[in-house]
Image (cartoon, helix red, strand yellow):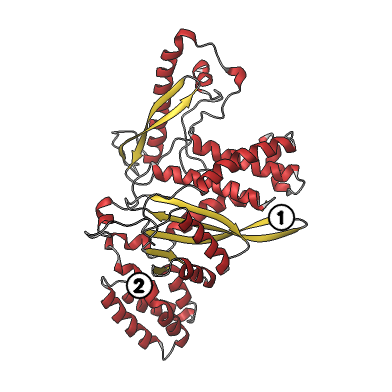
């Protein structure tokens, strides 16, 4: 086993059956960090045999990880089963033995990506880079200093940290500037905030994130940037950058109702439908009524958002506004002002309604980002924010690429009735 794991490029510490951990909800293999160059063994005539053995070994690791996620092994009948398999997806894996052709298991629900492939190493490298940078610049918190010591990175010099940062920054920048070749009919936009040190001050910065569903129903992370806030100029520049990279075919933008974001959308994507996040909107309406009346008002609102056609929903919206106005004028005013935008999703295929009527899909992505950024606490520079968040998003994008389509190709075809093909550059 030691010869095999070192030849593949990993250390052989504690090889064991993978389990779920609190650090990551995905099953993780116990095949850990890559070994150094001094661990390379003399392979000679055994190279082909070892490569075949390595392929079988990694296949078994993936089968066990997928089994953990499913709650049962392949073909196994079990009351604990939570998911099932859905074939395989091919992926090349470069090792010291040469290229291995892996078959990555696919799941019926959600996705699986082996812990030993590149996205996991990329995120870990980005994390080491950011906390080490904070340490060597002398701006780290006690929490970061503890992390540096635990990772064994205390001895890293400024030049070593700089080289690691430059390597990662190049990877992230290539991802952020890649051409967007397909049409993206659905575009989600949102922002989250992180703390960044600027000189002697700690300031709040907005991390702008965009993800979309392309014409074949696949999800992609489209862009990420750091700005001083969510003012119109920040969103306008961010969206203009997406257009400059080839974003086209947008039919619906889903976001909250931040004024700067709304103005940025109108300035760059004018003529595109806008879906105001239904979840945030309903919260805004209910915040205008006493707690004792919120259950009643929520029941009234439910009658609006359960209709299957724009016409029926608009009629129910008008009745709800008229019914609420006498006792709850504030709620009626919010409903009147934003109701039509919260119903935009009804003009699109019914099979997509649940996902496109709110920013919940992007909120889940932001939760994964916060899970990592909260560990750092205060970032040493704005560039370090882009490095870490960008690495997390690259990892997420890779996992989406090997998972199920977000929307079926049949349902996506409903967006494109027979007619002239979409032209690049049209939004």
1 or 2: tag closer to the N-terminus: 1
* Image height of 268 relative to 150, above or below: below
Q: CA distance from mark 1 to mark 2?
A: 41 Å
Label 2 SS? loop
The location of residue 158, given as percent across then percent down, is 74, 38
| Residue positioned 25% across, 55% down in the render | 413
Examine the rendering and report whether any part of residue 57 can be seen: no
Is residue 330 visible in the rendered image? The answer is yes
Q: Which quarter of the picture shows residue 193?
A: bottom right
Relative vertical location of residue 356 with respect to residue 95 in this rendering, above or below: below
Residue 179: x and y in percent read 45, 48
Q: Residues within 10 Å of mark 1 (few under 14, many from 20)?
A: some
At a point 45% along the width and 46% down the height, the residue shown is 397
- Identity of the residue drawn at 70% across and 47% down: 143
Which residue corresponds to mark 2? Answer: 343
User: What is the count of numbered marks?
Assistant: 2
In this rendering, the answer to whether 252 lies above or below 70 is: below
User: Badge 2, how many Cα within 10 Å: few under 14, some, many 20+?
Assistant: many
User: Residue 39: horizontal and vertical position, in percent?
Assistant: 59, 18
| Left or right of 340, for residue 12 | right
Q: Secondary structure at mark 1?
A: strand
**In this orientation, which residue lies closer to the viewer: 201 or 111?**
201
Location of residue 126 in the rendering, given as x and y in whole percent from the top left corner: 60, 42
- Name the mark on residue 197: 1
Q: Nearer the viewer, residue 279 or 16?
A: 279
């Amino acid at each position: 086993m030691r010869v095999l794991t070192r030849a593949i490029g990993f250390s052989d510490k504690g090889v064991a059956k993978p389990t779920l951990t609190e650090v990551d909800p995905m099953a993780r293999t116990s095949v850990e960090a890559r070994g150094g160059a001094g661990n390379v063994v003399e392979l000679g005539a055994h190279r082909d045999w070892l490569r075949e053995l390595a392929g079988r070994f990694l296949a078994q690791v993936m089968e066990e990880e997928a089994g953990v996620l499913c709650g049962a092994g392949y073909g196994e009948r079990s009351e604990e089963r939570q998911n099932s398999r859905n074939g395989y997806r091919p992926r090349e894996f470069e090792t010291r033995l040469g290229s291995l052709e892996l078959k990555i298991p696919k799941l019926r629900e959600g996705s699986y990506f082996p812990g030993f492939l590149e996205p996991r190493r990329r995120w870990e490298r980005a994390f080491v880079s950011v906390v080490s940078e904070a340490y060597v610049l002398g701006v780290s918190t006690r929490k970061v200093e503890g992390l540096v010591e635990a990772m064994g990175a205390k001895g890293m010099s400024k030049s070593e940290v700089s080289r690691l940062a430059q390597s990662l920054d190049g990877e992230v920048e290539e991802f952020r500037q890649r051409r967007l070749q397909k049409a993206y009919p659905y575009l989600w936009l949102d922002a989250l905030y992180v703390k960044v040190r600027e000189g002697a001050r700690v300031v709040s910065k907005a991390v702008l994130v965009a993800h979309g569903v392309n014409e074949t129903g696949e999800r992609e992370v489209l862009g990420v940037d750091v700005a001083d806030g969510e003012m119109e100029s920040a969103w306008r520049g961010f969206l203009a950058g997406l257009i400059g990279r080839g974003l086209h075919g947008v039919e619906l933008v889903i976001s909250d109702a931040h004024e700067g974001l709304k103005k940025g959308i109108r300035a760059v994507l004018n003529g595109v439908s806008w879906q105001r996040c239904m979840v945030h909107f309903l919260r805004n309406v209910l915040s205008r009524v006493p707690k004792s009346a919120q259950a009643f008002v929520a029941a009234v609102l439910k009658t609006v958002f359960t209709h299957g056609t724009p016409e029926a929903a608009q009629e129910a919206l008008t009745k709800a506004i008229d019914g609420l106005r006498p006792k709850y004028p504030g709620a009626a005013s919010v409903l009147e002002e934003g109701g039509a935008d919260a119903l935009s999703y009804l003009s699109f295929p019914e099979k997509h309604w649940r996902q496109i009527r709110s920013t919940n899909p992007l909120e889940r992505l932001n939760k994964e980002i916060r899970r990592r950024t909260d560990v750092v606490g205060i970032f040493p520079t704005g560039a370090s924010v882009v490095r870490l968040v960008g690495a997390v998003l690259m990892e997420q994008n890779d996992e989406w690429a090997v998972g199920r389509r977000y929307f079926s190709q049949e349902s996506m075809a409903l967006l494109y009735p027979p007619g002239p093909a979409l032209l690049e550059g049209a939004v």
